[in-house]
Image: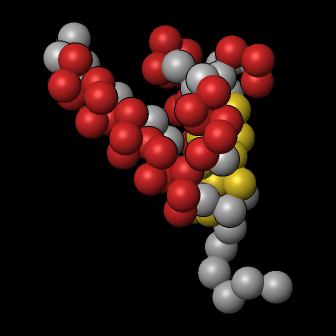
Amino acid sequence: MPNRPEIVCICGSTRFADELRAANRDLTFAGIIVVAPGEADEPITDDQKAMLGGLHLRKIDLADRVRPRGTSVQRLSVRTIMAA
């Protein structure tokens, strides 16, 4: 048994922000450390999108497991699946 809580990375499109937030809340109240995609209140640049994509891959590296939300596994990017 680990001496720390499990870490889960939520993966999915920010188009499903409400579902991502609900998963974050549910996992957090289950005693799990959650890392999730970054959110923006307004449109972002291509450079910002690339930076957030790279950052999300590092979040996956930190996680003990990945939990897809708001999309089917078939729709997750190959890059995300390979990182997991």
Q: Residue at x 44, y 42 (%)?
A: 56
Instruction: Tell me if residue 2 comes above or below residue 46 in the rendering.
Output: below
* Residue situated in front as seen by the camera: 41 or 49: 49
Position of 4 with respect to 14 (left or right) is: right
* Residue situated in front as seen by the camera: 4 or 49: 49
Q: Residue at x 47, y 20 (%)?
A: 14
Instruction: Tell me if residue 60 comes above or below residue 42 in the rendering.
Output: below
Instruction: Tell me if residue 19 comes above or below residue 34 in the rendering.
Output: above
Instruction: Tell me if residue 16 comes above or below residue 81 in the rendering.
Output: above
Position of 4 with respect to 42 (left or right) is: right
Q: State which quadrant residue 39 falls in.
A: top left
In the image, residue 66 lies at what x, y percent? 68, 46
Figure disc tally: 0
In the image, residue 28 lies at what x, y percent? 61, 54
Quarter holding the N terminus is bottom right
Whether residue 29 is visible: no
In the image, residue 58 lies at what x, y percent? 44, 53
Q: Residue at x 55, y 51 (%)?
A: 60
* Residue situated in front as seen by the camera: 36 or 27: 36
